[in-house]
Image: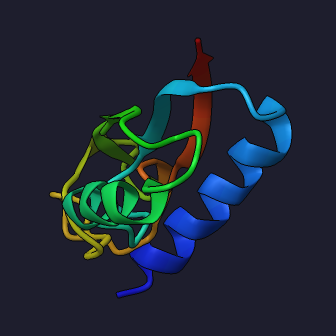
Amino acid sequence: MHELSIVQSLIDAVLDRTGGRAVTGVNLRIGPLSGVLPDALRFCFDVASAGTTLAGARLRIDEPQGRGLCRTCGNDFALTDMFLLCPCGSADVEVVTGREFKLVSVEVA
């Protein structure tokens, strides 16, 4: 479960920038093709933030839909998994969105 190390790095980054102020919320954007499982991240966040100024903070995760663009037919279509295959059958697909893992904002008291 690499989500624990991701959460620990996230918490460290937030702590470095909040100067000891109590954090009430952390907002992330995680795409379905990022390789990160949002539910596992939520669990790890609660465990790893205990005893820090992030304890009890609300973790909000925006999960945008993945989108692909077929270089063969020009079709823009939804990507739900790592199989980059256009409905036309072409595998020449560019991932437009879905690989995001971004810290969007932090809310402090």
| Relative depth, front residue between 94 and 102 | 102
Q: Residue at x 77, y 31 (%)?
A: 18
Q: Is 11 situated left or right of 66 in this image?
A: right
Give the farthest residue toward the bottom.
1
The x and y percentages for residue 104 are: 59, 29
| Relative depth, front residue between 97 and 68 | 97
Q: How is the image coloured?
A: rainbow
Q: In which quarter of the image is residue 57?
A: top left
Give the farthest residue toward the front.
51
The x and y percentages for residue 98 are: 41, 50
The x and y percentages for residue 109 are: 58, 12
37 versus 74 height, above or below: below
On the question of residue 15 being in view, the answer is yes
Rendered-image quadrant of the N terminus: bottom left
Q: Which residue is drawn at 26% across and 69% down?
A: 85
Q: Is 58 situated left or right of 5 in this image?
A: left
Q: Please tell me how many numbered marks the rendered image carries.
A: 0
The x and y percentages for residue 107 are: 57, 18
Q: In which quarter of the image is residue 36?
A: bottom left
Q: Which residue is drawn at 28% across and 54% down?
A: 42
| Relative depth, front residue between 104 and 85 | 104
Q: Is 94 situated left or right of 105 in this image?
A: left
| Relative depth, front residue between 31 and 103 | 103
On the question of residue 71 being in view, the answer is no
Q: Which residue is drawn at 35% across and 75% down?
A: 91
Q: In which quarter of the image is residue 67?
A: top left
